[in-house]
Image (spheres, grey):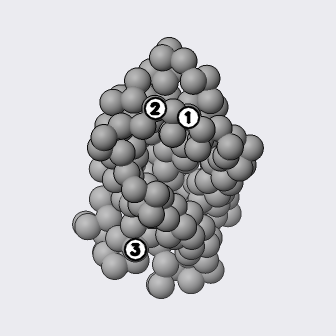
Amino acid sequence: MLVDASTRAAVAWTGPVAVLCACTLSICTQRIWRRVLGEVTCRWRLPYDLDGAAFSIWIPIYTLTYASVLAQLLALAWPDFFVVLDFNTNLGTASTWVHCACWVIFFDGETPKALWAAGAILSGGAATGVAALFTSHAWWEERQLAAVLTTAPLALLTGWLLNATIIAWGTA
C-alpha cells in the first residue's frame, strides 16, 4: 500500500513518541517507588547480587534512549543523517520500557507471589527487548552506523533486563 508523504511523517512520529512516553513512565514509577526498591533489595539479598555501582548503567540507558528518540525525530527533517526505526522496533522498545515501569509496582509487594510477578514482568520486558532488536535489522540498513547507534540504548536496556531477570527469579 502506498502511503503519501504526510501520512508517512505522521507514522514516523508515532514510534519514537511511544518510546519517549514509555521511558518517561518508567522514570516516574521508579521515582514514586524508589524507597521500596532499596528496602526490598536489602531484605532479599543474594550472594550473587550486583554491586550498587552497577546501577549507574541507568544513566547512559536513559540518556541514550532520549538521544535515540531525538535522533529519530530529527530524521524527519534530515533523512540523510538520521534514521527512523521500524514501527515494530519502536513498539517493542516502548513495550520494554512499560515492563520496566510495571515491575517496580509488583516488586513493592514484598511477598513471594509479588516477587514472582515481578520476575515474570522482567522476563516479558527482556523478551520484548530481544524481539525489538531482532526486528530492527540495524546491521543490514543502508545507513548502518546511524541504525546501530539508534538501537544501542535498546541493546543496553535489554542486556540489563536479561541480568535483572536472572536475579529476580533468584530472589523469587
Q: Secondary structure at mark 2?
A: loop
Mark 2 near mark 1, Cβ–Cβ under 8 Å? yes
Q: Which residue is mark 1?
A: 40
Q: Secondary structure at mark 3?
A: helix
Q: Which residue is mark 3?
A: 149
Q: Which residue is mark 2?
A: 44
Q: Nearer the viewer, residue 43 or 146?
A: 43
Q: Residues within 10 Å of mark 1 (few under 14, many from 20)?
A: some
N-terminal of the pair, mark 2 or mark 3, is 2
N-terminal of the pair, mark 3 or mark 1, is 1
Report how far apart the C-alphas of labels 3 and 1 lie in the structure.
35 Å
Q: Is residue 79 above or below residue 59?
A: below
Counting from the top left corner in percent of width and height, residue 159 is at 34, 53
Is 40 situated left or right of 161 in this image? right
Q: Nearer the viewer, residue 25 or 16?
A: 25
Amino acid type of the residue tagged 3 in the rendering: Leu
